Image (cartoon, rainbow, N blue to C red):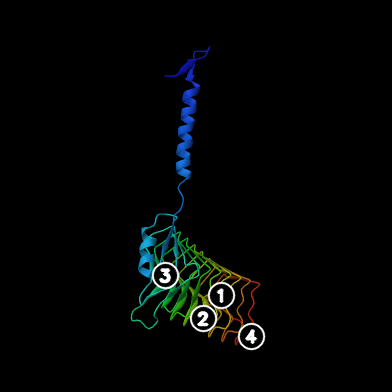
Amino acid sequence: MNTTTNINGLRHYGHKNIIKGALILSLILSLIGGVSAATLYCGSCTNCTTTINSATNGDIVKLTQNISTTGTCISFENNNRTFDCQGYTIDGDGDAPGWHFGIYLNGKSNDTIKNCIITDFNEGIYLSSSSNNILTNNIVNNNTWRGISLESSSNNTLTNNTANNDNNYGIELDSSSNNILTDNTAKENNQGIVLGSSSNNTLTNNTANDNGDNGISLDSSSNNTLTGNTANNNTNWGIILNSASNNTLTGNTANNNRLVAK
């Protein structure tokens, strides 16, 4: 071994071994740091579902064209994936028998869905028992029941999504907590944004105008914070709290609704 002994009798490695060890450590660190997310592509509902679910953690899957189906289009089976529609449309058949989703997550976490246009499903984007997901820059219009729905789902972030002309709810949170909704739009639905039995959610700068019933509705929901939201020109209430407690409303606007406030 290439060693030397100093005057105190302590043995230590020579320069060659020190340099060799440093090079090996540098190589290991570069290999670890060099692992990056892959970008994959898909062009049909089946192909996208397969590609998303065979991808590895952190991979990005991009849609390359408009796609359509008569059933559910995309179902996530894994966590930590990003699906980017790049502005392309996922189109369903609202008259098809059964209950169908544009994008479906059940028990999933750390997934991102962005830049999608989703139309003509029973439900556009549906999260069930899913947490820490991100929905951003999606347009979810003309679905027969709900545009975006979170059921028993927590700690999700919805930003700059549009849910218009959905037959029932634009955006609904059902038994869901600690979600953040910012800069979303829900117009010309039966109801704009609905929280049912949901707590500790934060709604900021959302717009819920021109809906057939209520703009923003909190039903049996507590400890939510609503700040700077707009709910104008709705047929009934702009913002309604029904059997709801300990909610904080600050700087919201509700004009030209048939019913003033509750």
Q: Secondary structure at mark 1?
A: loop
The residue wearing badge 4 is 256
Q: Earlier in the sequence, mark 2 or mark 1?
A: 1
Please state which amino acid type lies under the numbered disc 1. Thr
- State which quadrant residue 235 falls in: bottom right
For disc 1, the neighbor class at 10 Å (few under 14, some 14 to 19, many from 20) is many
Disc 3 + disc 1, Cβ < 8 Å: no
Please state which amino acid type lies under the numbered disc 2. Gln
Q: Nearer the viewer, mark 3 or mark 4?
A: 3
Q: Tell me where residue 122 appears, x and y as whole percent.
A: 41, 78
For disc 3, the neighbor class at 10 Å (few under 14, some 14 to 19, many from 20) is many
Residue 185: which numbered mark, if any? 1
Q: Earlier in the sequence, mark 2 or mark 4?
A: 2
Q: Secondary structure at mark 4?
A: loop
Q: Residue at 62% across / 84% down in the picture?
A: 260
Q: Secondary structure at mark 2?
A: strand
The residue wearing badge 3 is 103
Q: Is residue 149 visible?
A: yes
Position of 238 with respect to 67 (left or right) is right
Give the residue furthest to the right. Answer: 251
In which quadrant is the C terminus drawn? bottom right
